[in-house]
Every structure is written in structure tokens, then in C-alpha cells.
Image (spheres, grey):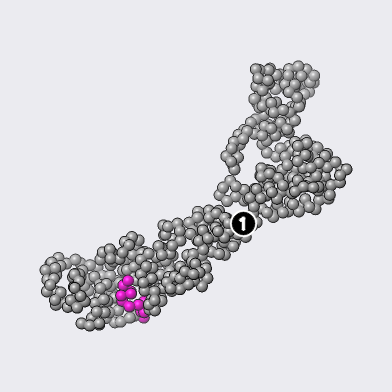
Amino acid sequence: MGGRGQARGTRRACLHRCDTHGVALCALPPGANSHETYDVVTQVMRHDKLLAAAAADPVPLQDSPFEAYIRLRIRHGPQDDWLKSLELVHLHRACMTLGLTISGHEEKRLIEVDRNSERRACDVGFAVLAQGAPGLEQAFERLRHQARDARAYFSADLGHFHAWLRTVQDVPALDCLTSVVRRHVFRHYPAKPDRPVLGRLPDAIAQITFDEARSRAKLGVSFLKRLLAHIDGVEPSEVAARISITPTDLDRVTAFWATLCNLTEAAEALGIRPEQVKALIHAGVLSHLRFGSALRYPCRAEIDALLQAVDVLPRSRPWSGDLPLTTFCAHRSISLAGVIAAWRSGVLVGQVAQGEGTGLQALRIAPDALCDRDAQRPDRDPGLADAARYLRISLTAIRCLRDAGLLQQIRKRNADTNFQRSCITRTSIRLRTATVVFSPSLAFFREESLRGFTPNIVSYEARPLKRVWASSAITMTRGN
């Protein structure tokens, strides 16, 4: 037995069943050298007791599709199929390693795999390879989606199959396998231009890691995924499972983020505080987006449009008496957002001019603008201090009316800080301003201050308590 016998012995190493008797073949211990191993007579005589024990208790085995194909190749030569270029030893290794990878075997060394596991793995791998390149690509795709590692490692996903291919990547007959592996890796995994995969460098980078995308876009990985989910209109959980991103998607995310800004950037551009930017958003002057958190991101285009509207205003004349925006808001007890909303809605036509300042601080408002009481009405539930400024009474008087039940107080949570703030409801303010005459002095709550009111005005009866009118018991009775 020479080289030909050596080759035939190697080819039959993957057969575990006797095709004639349908039982498991008996594996004899290897000889000291290859000549002893293939000296059949000497091996049978040396291990006659082992063979007799196996013949006395044979183990029946079902036929295997992989072994049936191997016998067909041995008896009739290579078939006209996708695997015809593979030698039997390579075919055996390909089917076994691919089957072990698909089955999820965690043995680090192939020598630790027992015969039964090897036989099942060969059948699983052969079922995939028999479908050709499309079947192999589908198997790779399933392995990629089943990956348990949050980072992108194609060597971990392809397991034993990739480890074996690395040892035989220079064999020309295996190009049908290595080409499919390279195409899959370059398409779905981040690759570096100077790092070859199975002996070849990528022609173009199709995927990059989110860590590299973070360094390029200067954005966090989680925020990048939320932006991508918003752009594609999918659930954030779908994008959260991704381990890489294409350069095209990264360009889309970067271009979309360029159209947005955070509250600090918006406040600097408009010359106001971030809290006032939130008020402009609430008043409908600016729109915003949220990406899975309480943070708001206004649109840069609307901020630019607001600044352009300021630039086209006529210049304020020194003798006109126009007030700066902040001075006007303090004088009229109106929020900055309320003034800007009135200006943008056309209420202040001819009453707004342009002066010196940055952003919205360049606005100059006519002193007689928004004289109507209804125009100063708060656009949301104000705090106690804002309600006092609106009603033009003291903060102590607001607390007095609240304790008496004339004004309703609620607690509202700030979505950004989770801080709960006490507010007076607009409904109660609107009701009381329609039926009550408020005095800017605390003397209004004194009993003697009510003697001058006529019966047509709502009258009150006040009874002072220990604290200075802060806990007054006030009852309201309507006059005839």
C-alpha cells in the first residue's frame, strides 16, 4: 500500500457506518507508523478481541446523507455539483466544522468532539453546502442574527468553520467557500482597509463599528442608534441590536443631526436662557424632537427663520420710547414666550422694531403694546410668583386666596428634571378675574377695606388668623 492507499484511507476516515450490515464501524487504535496502520492483517490479528467484542454486540446506525454522498464520490468520482472541486478530506472538514458551528458546539478543539457529534455535524453541514452558495449565505445570516456578543466579530459568529478555512485559505479548490465567506464578512461586518480576510483585503468598506462611527460623528452610540431609528421610522429596539452601521447611514444621521441643536445652542443663538427656549417650544413658536428621553432638540431652520425675522424689522428710533424685550416683559408682567408668540402670530404688527442686542434681545416693543388684559393672560398654568405678577397682587395674597379655595393649586412635574413645581390653574385664574376685583394691597383682605364696595361687586368676609393674613378664612358671597 503506497500513496494511493494512504489517500483511500484518508477518504474513508469520515465513514462511521458499514453500508452492507448497517452497523457502526469499529475504530482500531492507530499503529506506531503509517505502515502498521494500513497493514490490515496485522491490525486485525493484534486487535482480534476488540473486533470480536464489537461483532458480538453490534451498534445499528441509520444511514447518513453525508456518508451516502461520500460513498457516491468514492465509487463514481466527483459529481456535477457545487462541491465537485473539493477533495474528500476538505469536504469532510467543511461539513463537520460548519455543522458544529450551526449546532452551537462550544468545544474549542475538534479533537474533543466525539464520533456521534461529528456524524451529526457532518449531516448538518452537508445539508447546507448541498444548497450551494445561496444556502451557505443564508446560514451565515442566521448565525449573524443569533450572535450573543454585542460587538461585531465575524470570527466568533463563524466559529470552527472560519478557523478551519484560515488554515487552508491558500488552497485554490476552496475558492468556492472562501469567496462566499469574504463576501459575507465585507458586506455585514466592519472591516479595516489594511486587515485581510482569508488572504484578501476589502475592496470597499461596507460596514463600520459604532465605536468608529462615534468618533467620526462626535455622538454617543446610543444616541446614534436612536437618531437612525427616527430617520428610518422603526422601533429603537430594532436598531439597538445592530452591531455596525454603513457609511451611508452614518452620513444620513450626521446630515439629520446638523438640522437640530440642543437647548443650550438654541439659547445662545437667540440670546435667551434655555428655560425660555422651552417656553417658546411650549408656546408653539419652535418645534422640537425627542429621541427616547426628556431632552428637547429644536430645529435650526426655525431658529434661523426667527433671527431673520428680527433682522428685517425696521430700526427703532431713539425718541420712539420703545422698550427692550426684557424690560417690556417685566413692565407688562408677560412672559418672553408670550410676547414672541404674539409677535409671530401678527398681534404686534407695527409695534415691534429692531434695536441693539443679540438674537431676540434686539427686539424693541412699543410701550402701549398688549394693553388688553386678555392678551396678557398666561398660556399655561403659572407658578405662584407668575400668578402674583399677572393678578398684580402680592405673593402672600396669592397664598391667601389659595388657602381659601378661591385659587386652585396643582403640582406639575418637570419632564427634564423630575422636579415638581406648584402652579395655579389657569381655569381658576380665569374664573376669579371674571368675578373678583383684586387690589394690589394686602389691605384688601382687611375687614374695614370692604366697607366701600357697592352691592354689585363681589364682597368678602375676612377673619384674620395668627399669621399675617396668610391663612385667612375667606368665604365668597355674591351681592344682589
Residue 226 in view here: no
Q: Quadrant of residue 365?
A: top right
Q: Which quadrant holds the N terminus?
A: bottom left
Q: Which residue is mark 1?
A: 257
In the rendered view, tell whether residue 98 sits above or below residue 308: below
Which residue is at 51% across, 57% downward?
239
Quadrant showing the C terminus: top right
Q: Secondary structure under badge 1?
A: helix
Q: Position of residue 235 (x, y in %)?
A: 53, 54
Total number of numbered discs in the rendering: 1
The three-letter amino acid code for the residue at tag 1 is Trp
Question: What stretch of residues is rendered in magenta?
Answer: 80-93
**Closest to the observer, 188 or 267:** 267
Q: Badge 1: few (under 14), some or many (20 or more) residues near its Cα, within 10 Å?
A: some
**128 horizontally vs 451: left or right:** left
Q: Is residue 439 above or below residue 411?
A: above
> x and y percent of residue 460 in the render?
72, 21
